[in-house]
Amino acid sequence: MIKTNANFSKLTPSYLFSEVARKIAAFSHDHKDVDVIRMSIGDVTRPICRAAVDALHRAADEQADAAAFHGYGPEQGYAFLRDKIAAADYEGLGITPDEIFISDGAKSDIGNIGDILSADSVVAVTDPVYPVYVDTNIMAGRRIIYLPCTEENGFLPELPAERPDIIYLCYPNNPTGTTMSRSVLQRWVDYALESRALILFDSAYEVFITEADVPHSIYEIDGAKRCAIEFRSFSKTAGFTGMRCGYTVVPRELKADDGTPLRDLWLRRQTTKFNGASYPVQRAAEAIYSPEGNRQVREAIDYYLGNAAIMLDGLRAAGLECYGGVNAPYVWVKAPANMTSWQMFDLLLERCGIASTPGIGFGQCGEGYIRLTAFNTRENTIAAIRRIATNLKP
């Protein structure tokens, strides 16, 4: 008899974005004359920058040269990339290259980090929340505490009434696009240190931050290296959604209750279950830290932030209440007239030909909202706002 993990039966039948894709495909099949503007799944549309592409080509050519060929690489990632990350992304923060682990993306690491943590751990997540945090812990059989993030509290969670072992924080936030100030994040770090909780900090959208009081890394906060693991991604930073590359930082100061460094456990996990991101992709990631690569990446980020500004202005002019979009590529839109999330999703799709993501898919507190992304062309962004202004008049 084949026995399966019974925890999978506790999951929703399909992953949120798979259900969104299914509904869009059905609509497109029945309305072949409608050019659907996809502002739902957060996939980028700008091409990978020239500096990274050139580095990718050079690395691929090396693979055809016996003298330059690279086979299995170090599971933690090549030193040339980890050195660049430590120097550029964590300058002055005391993060060293051997505390940085290159992977095939932040999503994988966020799901896999549970391998080094007890299945008995109690997990706290914000609501609404990126579904991967919830689903991977349900798969592991952990109990989850939900921390409401609503319009009333500025989409910032209150410290939990019940002590959790693990706390997921994502700021700038997916899906709401809102941020956590330095002082607020300090309060969370202080709480984690006092209660011996572990913060898993998703910093995938830090490159979109425009305001000075919003920290790019949790390690800017005093004490964070003793209570936090940080995840970052090149997907939104440099358009690597198809290339797959990210990294996780596990400081040596971060230790379990028995004194075991979590960094050593993560290294052991990675050397057993992961063979490392590919050499050409890591060379491409390295290239974005060059002066030219940095400039080109910044141009793409500014392009998406420009889209977000157009969205905010246009949506508000159309009478819709919305949040985010200033330090993040996401705009969190409140559905009018007490509509549900899926009703708003259907309305935008059927009346405007715009695909969104229903807020209820991110948790109960997401009900009555939709998420729109700025990851589209400027032309499509302008067209989408024009359709909303024309077809959703009060």
Image (spheres, grey):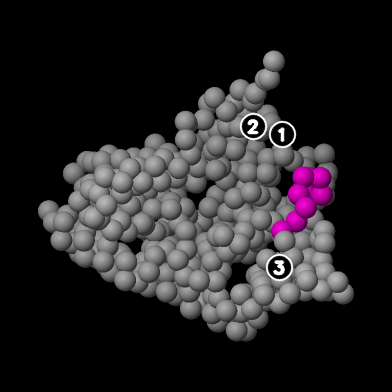
> Mark number for residue 140?
2
**Comparing labels 1 and 2, the label whose residue is closer to the camera:** 2
In which quadrant of the rendered view does residue 167 lie? top right
Residue at screen point 75% across, 56% down: 276
* Res 280 label: 3
Q: How crowded is mark 3: few (under 14 residues within 10 Å), some or many (20 or more)?
A: many
Compare residues 309 and 81 and report the one nearer the observer.
81
Tag in front: 3 or 2: 3
Kind of residue at badge 3? Pro
- Whether residues under marks 1 and 2 lie with C-beta atoms below 8 angstroms apart, the answer is no
Where does the magenta region start and end?
269-277
Q: In which quarter of the image is residue 219?
A: bottom right
The amino acid marked with disc number 2 is Ala
SS at badge 1: loop
For the residues labelled 1 and 2, the Cα–Cα distance comes to 9 Å
CA separation, marks 3 and 2?
A: 33 Å
Of residues 263 and 101, the one drawn nearer to the viewer in this rendering: 101
Residue 272 shown in magenta: yes
Residue 358 image offset from top left, x and y in percent: 35, 45
Q: In this view, does 61 lie above or below 229?
A: below
Are there few (<14), some (14-19), or many (20+) residues within 10 Å of tag 2?
Answer: some
Q: Give the residue at mark 1.
A: 118
